[in-house]
Image (spheres, rainbow, N blue to C red):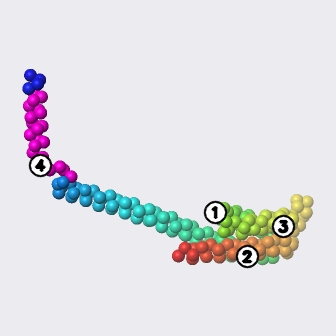
Amino acid sequence: METDSCKIWINQLGENIATIDTPYWETGDFYIALVVGLVSIGFSIMAYLEAKKAKNAANEAGKTVKTQSITIELTELTQKLDNINSGYSYQSVRDIYNELNRRIRRVVSVYKSDQEYSDLIKSILAVLDNTRKSLNGVRPTKTSQDETPAFIIFNATEGHFSDLNGKLAELIGLLEQRAIDKL
C-alpha cells in the first residue's frame, strides 16, 4: 500500500516537472524581480550615504554654533575686563576675578587638547594664576582696621587683567578665523 502512494507521488512530481518548460532564471519574471531588487539596494545605499552626510553636516553646524556661543561669552568677559577701574574694593575685584576664573576655565577646557589653541590656553591659565597671586598679595588682613586702598588693588591686578584681556581677544580671533575657514 505504501509503495502505491509513493508511486502516485512520484508520478505527480514527474508531471509537475514536465510542465516546467524553462528554468526560472530564463524567464522575464526573474529579470524583472532582479532589476527591482538591485534598484532597491541601490536606493538603500544612496539613502544611507545621504543620511551620513546629513549627520556630519549637523555635527559641524552644532560645533559652529558652540564656537559662536563661546566667542560671545568670551567677548562678554573682555567687556567686563574693560570696565575694571581703580575705584573697586578688594571684595569687588575678588568677585570679578572669581567669576572670570570660573567662566574662562570652563570655556577654554573645550579647546585644551586642541594643538592650535593649547599654548594660548596655557598662557591664559597662567595669567589667571598670576592674577590670583597678586590679588592675594593685597588682601586685607583681619588685624588691619582699614580696607586696602583701591588704587593698590588696582595697581596689583591691572596689568594681569590687561594681559588677560589681550589673550582672550586673541582666542576670540582664532575661534572666529576657524569658523570663517569652515565656510
* Label 4: element kind: loop
**Which one is in front in this view, the residue at disc 2 or the one at disc 3?**
2
**157, above or below 44, in the image:** below
Where in the figure is residue 83, as x and y percent of width and height?
A: 73, 77
State left or right for residue 7 relative to residue 166: left
According to the image, label 4 marks what residue? 21
Q: Earlier in the sequence, mark 1 or mark 4?
A: 4
Seen at 61% across and 69% down, the residue is 70
Q: CB under 8 Å between callouts 4 and 2?
A: no
The local crowd at label 1, few if under 14, some if 14 to 19, many if 20 or more residues have their Cα within 10 Å, is: few
Q: CB under 8 Å between callouts 1 and 3?
A: no
Q: Nearer the viewer, residue 83 or 20?
A: 20
- Amino acid at dot 4: Asp
Q: Earlier in the sequence, mark 3 or mark 4?
A: 4
Q: Is residue 14 highlighted in magenta?
A: yes
**Which one is in front in this view, the residue at disc 3 or the one at disc 4?**
4
Disc 3/disc 4 C-alpha distance (Å):
99 Å
* Label 1: element kind: helix
Disc 1/disc 3 C-alpha distance (Å):
27 Å
Seen at 8% across and 31% down, the residue is 8
- Amino acid at dot 3: Ser
According to the image, label 3 marks what residue? 134
According to the image, label 1 marks what residue? 110
What span is in magenta? 5-25
- Amino acid at dot 2: Gly
Disc sitting over residue 166 in the figure = 2
Q: Earlier in the sequence, mark 1 or mark 3?
A: 1
Disc 4/disc 2 C-alpha distance (Å):
88 Å
Q: Earlier in the sequence, mark 2 or mark 3?
A: 3
